[in-house]
Image: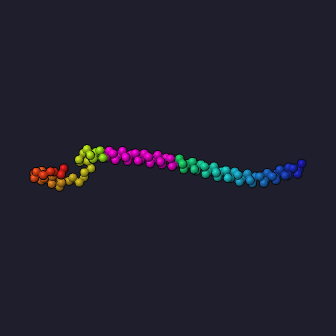
């Protein structure tokens, strides 16, 4: 009987080392799965933000284009007093004005 108990204890010690390795391996795998899941969530959020950024830039560009085509003075910063003077001279000379 003592011999049987001694063999069981020795087997448990040997298996304990294997169990510790399996537990360690499973812990590493679990940690890796958790890290991978977090990275995938982060990437999906970044993709969503990129999509919203694209839509926002596209709608702003369309709005800019519409305003630019409707209003001559919208974003035409180069129209200065000098051009207005040239335009007045061209009108007096019966030429087509710039503005």
Does the magenta stretch mainly form a helix, a strand or a loop?
helix
Q: How many marks?
A: 0
- The residue located at (73%, 51%) in the rendering is 19
- The residue located at (26%, 46%) in the rendering is 69
Question: At which x and y percent is residue 84?
Answer: 17, 52
User: Would you say residue 27 sits in the magenta stretch?
Assistant: no
Residue that extends furthest to the left in the rendered view of this protein? 93
The colour scheme applied to this rendered structure is rainbow
- The residue located at (54%, 50%) in the rendering is 39
User: Would you say residue 45 sits in the magenta stretch?
Assistant: yes
Please indicate, yes or no, whether residue 88 appears anywhere in the rendered image. Answer: no
In the rendered structure, the answer to whether residue 40 lies left or right of residue 26 reads left
Question: At which x and y percent is residue 98?
Answer: 18, 51
- The residue located at (12%, 52%) in the rendering is 95
Question: At which x and y percent is residue 62?
Answer: 33, 45
Question: At which x and y percent is residue 36?
Answer: 57, 50
In the rendered structure, the answer to whether residue 7 lies left or right of residue 73 reads right
Please indicate, yes or no, whether residue 12 appears anywhere in the rendered image. Answer: yes
Q: Name the one closer to the observer, 82 or 69.
A: 69
In the rendered structure, the answer to whether residue 56 lies left or right of residue 65 reads right
In magenta, the rendered stretch is 42-64
């Amino acid at each position: 009987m003592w011999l049987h108990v001694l063999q069981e204890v020795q087997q448990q010690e040997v298996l304990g080392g294997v169990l510790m390795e399996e537990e360690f391996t499973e812990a590493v795998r679990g940690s890796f799965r958790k890290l991978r899941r977090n990275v995938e969530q982060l990437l999906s959020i970044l993709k969503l933000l990129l999509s919203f950024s694209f839509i926002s830039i596209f709608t702003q560009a369309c709005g800019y284009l519409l305003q630019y085509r409707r209003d001559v003075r919208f974003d035409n910063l180069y129209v200065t007093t000098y051009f207005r003077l040239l335009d007045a001279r061209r009108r007096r000379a019966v030429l087509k004005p710039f503005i």
